[in-house]
Image (tube, coloured by chain):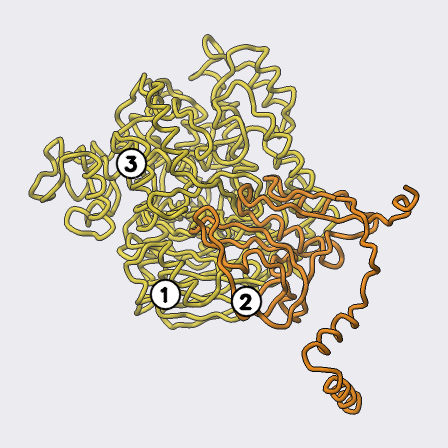
Amino acid sequence: MRYAETGFNLEIDLTRGSIERVPTDPRHTEQHLGGLGTNAKLFWDRVPPETEPFSEDNLLIFGTGLLTGTPAPGCNRTILSTLSPQTRLFAFSMMGGFWGPELKHAGYDKLIVRGKSPELVYLWIRDDEVEIRDASHCRGLGTLETAEVIRQELNEPHAQISSIGLAGENRVYYASVEQGRSSASRLGLGAVMGDKNLKAIAVRGTKDINIADPMKFIGLCNDALKFIKDRNEKPIPGVMPILAGLGSPQEMAIHDEKWHTESFAWGNARTRRKGFWTEEVETLWTNTMENMRTRLLSCHNCPMKCGAAISVDTRMCSYMMKCFSKLTYTMGAFSDLEFGLRIAQKATEHGVDAFTAPQTMAFAVELYEAGILTDKEMPGFPEGNEERFYWLLDKIVKREGIGDILANGTHWAAEEIGKGAMDFAHNNIKKHEQLPLKLGMLNPIYFLMYSTGEKINITQIEGNFPQAPFPTREEREAFCEDWPQVPDQKFKDYFLNWELRGENSIPNYPTVEMTCDIVDWQEMMHYIDDCTGMCAGLSSFPLKPPFHIHNLPTLISAATGFDLDEESLKHVTKRNRNLVRANNLRRGMTRADEKPPADHWKKRFPELEEELMDKYYAFKGWNREGIPTRQTLHDLDLDYVHEDFVKRRILKEEASSKGSTS
Amino acid sequence: MADKEQKKKKIIKTIKVDVDKCNGCRACEVICSAFHSAPRYSSDNPGRARIRVIREPLSDIYVPVFAGEYTPAECAGRNKYIIDGKEYDECAFCRASCPSRDFFKEPDSGLPLKCDTCESEPSLEEPMCVQWCLADALIYEEREVDEDEAPARNEVDVGLESLVDKHGWEKLVDAVARLKKKS
């Protein structure tokens, strides 16, 4: 018997209309766990680097995490992988919600979609019965509208549905896959789904998920719930409210937005507005949220309430929102919270990423004001900022006029527009729009995370180490007293000696070596979560979470029957990290791509930055170009990756000295 | 006084459901199905749960309902209730394991399921769904009440009486004789 996983993938070829239930190799689970790890393995084996994002050969993988759907609190994530139309790299974007557990209960660990359907279709998965059904009547419908139509048509109120809106149908490079409570938004997975002519996937599952060591496993789950209950009553002092608790930042519950509105940049990620957060604004925005938010919401089997039902019309719930999408439209358009919550409803129905979409719209506004885009390209462009955003959203999701260019994101749009437009696409990493953050002094930890993170999204890389030093040693000592989550005691010393000013402050402290350790720890936790399907909000993202490197090996072992300890879990994670990177390296990613936006910090330190990159690459077992060495790959049982690298001349066959490319 | 002391007491187990506090996470379904699996916690499957959150996210309806009695037929007519502007189907509050819906029955065999408030040896302080509901939408209460003085009536008697009421003695005796012959 297979434990925690089902042992089967569902393979759909939309070109041929074929449906197969395929048993998986249990050794792959041992080597890569599940979720992202096995997605990366499938991708390596089956999607050669010549593949185009919009081609029949590109796979769209919906991979549940290894523990998704088990009673482990917060294990509800689905990891979507495909070749991104925007970065042209291996994309992985996650969603929580309810869809993943439903797929697992239907008897599948992954849904793997290839080919292209000649007509718009949706999938209906009801345990062993799987159908490809006509979706022509859903064409142009919103993501939530589609889900409602399908639920009624199937007469299945309990079906969980992932769908795309107009943006996905029209292959907008930042189209999302939405499932109501949650979405996989980054990197254009919805565009690939649209290219495959797949409008939605409805799932209903009524099968068991088995646990290898039930009493031990449930004991760990009970411990975690108790921890969460206590931790929720004890927010961490000394950090801003949204970082004091568990979960993703509690944007739906917390009204104090001083930090976001004054530290993050408005418009096209340009303008800091110090002093913006007045009592008047606070009252207005608090009222807006209190009036429009009808309920705080959780994902499957999670006690946190990171999401909310938002009402913008007569319905009690017009759509569901979470996290920082609360402010991205508001700040992109220099508007207020009510505008942000209203336009987000349309954007959610159309299915676009709430980071990239407002950034791209603000980019267009700036280009227009700079005279690079004119009334010739944008006939009828309205006057006011808010009207402009609605106008642009409409053009983009329909790919009408200028929208057809803007639908490719700021990088590709700037390239097509020319006339110096590239200077306005200034907030990208690896061609992908980032959080609108523009800060003063380089922070070495964030520099490395931004540069080397292949999730290409800082919130999915940062986490367990405090973002900033605490002012006094007493506060730091108090923080360290109760910090069993650290993989090693040295992290406490790193933090204890980290000062706001003086010798032990950024950019020279944490030192390069410490920075490598800290970045590696935070990244490792995210990679573990993306394989288990554990929400980052209970593990890799917040300070002092219930799940960490000391209890996750036991949790995974109790669920699966594996014999994992910390060292072996770290080893598997390292293997997955390198395999994700390998997928990107053979698609042409190089060291030159690994850098934050040039204007992310005002004060930069080129020599220090070079040293950070050199040392971190070496720390990871990569050469100066960021390519895993033969030895590294061999130690991780990835010799086949090395062979491929040699064949493609990414690595030279024989090399020994440090300066060479091996 | 003496009379009253002799009166029997019984414990009524109640799970209070605060629908305003429900965040729709379905942890109650997960842990219920895990607790009732054999061996205990060896699997989970909300499809087998004896509690379901009736969810209609776009109507903001979240009602945890516990499995009650089995009924062979669905209701002929159903009421709708409008509460705080939200329209609830009567079924949203109904605990029956009934043919009109696909829960409160084993997915494979179709046998009805019923909440037993996690009765077990040793007994739990609270049913598992309550323990796992950190939102406090489910609150467990035990109330001591005086037992009814009238002895509990035999179920067969109740059923037969209702049939006599409906069809008369003669028809009923005939039917019993006919059935007995058949078996």
Q: In the shown orientation, is residue A114 left or right of residue A228?
A: left
* Relative depth, front residue between A646 and A229: A229
Query: Which residue, given by chain and number where applicable, does mark 1 sit on?
Result: A115
- Residue A339's mark? 3
Per the image, the residue denoted by label 2 is A127
Q: Which type of secondary structure does the marked residue at label 1 adopt? A: loop
| Residue sitting farthest toward the right | B2
Residue type, numbered disc 3: Phe
Left or right side of A379 for A274: right
Which quadrant of the figure contains the C terminus of chain B?
Answer: bottom right
Residue in the image at 43% along x and 72% along y? A18
Q: Colour of chain A?
A: yellow
Give me the C-alpha separation between circle 2 and circle 1.
Answer: 23 Å
Give the chain letter at badge 1: A
Residue placed most toward the observer, B89 or A326 = B89
Mark toward the viewer: 1 or 3? 3
Query: What residue is drawn where x is 31% and y is 40%?
Result: A342
Could you say where residue A605 lies in the image, as x and y percent from the top left?
35, 19
| Gap in angstroms between the C-alphas marked 3 and 2 | 42 Å
Kind of residue sitting beneath label 2: Asp
Query: Mark 3 falls on what kind of element?
Result: helix
